[in-house]
Amino acid sequence: MSLLEIDLSKCDQCGMCVAVCPVCTIAANDNGPHALHEENCISCGHCTAVCPQDALTNTKISHLTQATIDCGLLPDPDAVDYLLRTRRSCRNFTSEKVSRELIAKVLNTSHYAPTAANTDGIEFLVIDNPERLTQITLAVVNEIDEFIYNSSPLPEMLTAMIAQFRKHGTDTVLRGAPCLVLSLADKELLPVFRENGRFMIGYAELYAHALGLGCCRAGLIDVCVFSKHKRLLELLQIPADKVLCGAFVLGYPQYEFQRIVDRGKPEITFID
């Protein structure tokens, strides 16, 4: 079966499918578009999604599974700008649990983030058991203590955070959030493709903000996982064929911010 199926009664040979193909898999001649080097197709669906005549079918990804875009549902630019600028990292959460249905909604939407060469290869591991979350925090604190004991250089801020936990029981690792999400990639993916998982976390943070949820990256989880801390790995139960891309916590914010952070203006250089 050919990669492309063309309904010649609909195709007006506009050339859009050829233009948008990111890997130059499609060419055109007097008989319309046809596939070249079919093995290079990355199943992105650009070709079928752009066709205004609905004349093209890609046998790797059916256009029938792609929802039609309604531009009238898109937010105006000012609304998007406001969403982006008002999002802050949340480090104080209420004790209210986030339903698994809502967590799944956030992660399903985050899965639409761009991925390198449409590789995807990302899955999520969600931990929302309070006892396990407490054990994870303790495992991370103990790992950081080992760094300190072995005289490894650590930022003063980090040592202060651990001291706060030891003295007052303040969770400075997961921030008392009711949910921890790990973004995982197949080990066989090239390192550059593992950024896919981080792209999805970015989408998740923004959509969660729109839903009234708070998020914060759990960077200490990354540090301890890559140092292969045995107890933490036992608690996280990351499959043997997966590698961590990133981690974040999710929950309902305890406090509501009243101001937008002032980032100032970025340094921008234009080159002619």
Image (spheres, rainbow, N blue to C red):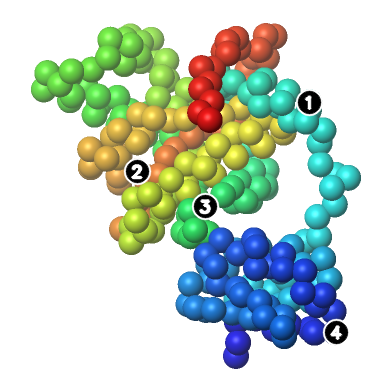
| Residue type pointed to by label 1 | Asp
Residue at 23% from the left image edge and 17% from the top image edge: 154
| x and y, in percent, of residue 208 in the image | 65, 34
Q: Alpha-carbon distance for marks 4 and 2?
A: 59 Å
Q: Which residue is mark 4?
A: 9
**Pointers 4 and 2 in contact (C-beta within 8 Å):** no
- What is the spatial separation of the Cα atoms under label 4 and label 1, in whole angstroms? 42 Å
Q: Nearer the viewer, mark 4 or mark 2?
A: 4
Q: Neighbour class for label 3 at 10 Å: few (<14), some, many (≥20)?
A: many
Among the two numbered marks 2 and 1 on one chain, the one whose residue lies closer to the N terminus: 1
Residue linked to disc 1: 78
- Per the image, the residue denoted by label 2 is 235
Are the residues flagged by discs 3 and 2 in contact, CB closer than 8 Å?
A: no
The label number, if any, that marks residue 115 in the structure image: 3
- Within 10 Å of the Cα at label 2, are there few (<14), some (14-19), or many (20+) other Cα atoms? some
Name the quadrant of the N terminus.
bottom right
Marks 3 and 2 sit apart, C-alpha to C-alpha, by: 29 Å
Which element is circle 4 on? loop
Residue 125 picture location, percent across and down: 47, 49
Q: Compare marks 4 and 2 and give the one earlier in the sequence.
A: 4
Q: Are marks 2 and 1 in contact (CB under 8 Å)?
A: no
Of badges 4 and 1, nearer the viewer stands 4
Density class for disc 1 (Cα within 10 Å; few <14, some 14-19, many ≥20) is few
Labels 1 and 3: the sequence-earlier one: 1
State the CA–CA distance, disc 3 to disc 4: 34 Å
* C-alpha distance separating marks 1 and 3: 26 Å
Up-down relation of residue 119 to residue 232 (above or below): below
Amino acid type assigned to the residue bearing label 3 in the image: Thr
Which amino acid, by three-letter code, is at mark 2?
Leu
> Is residue 32 visible from the viewing direction of this image?
yes
For discs 3 and 2, the disc positioned in front in the rendered view: 3
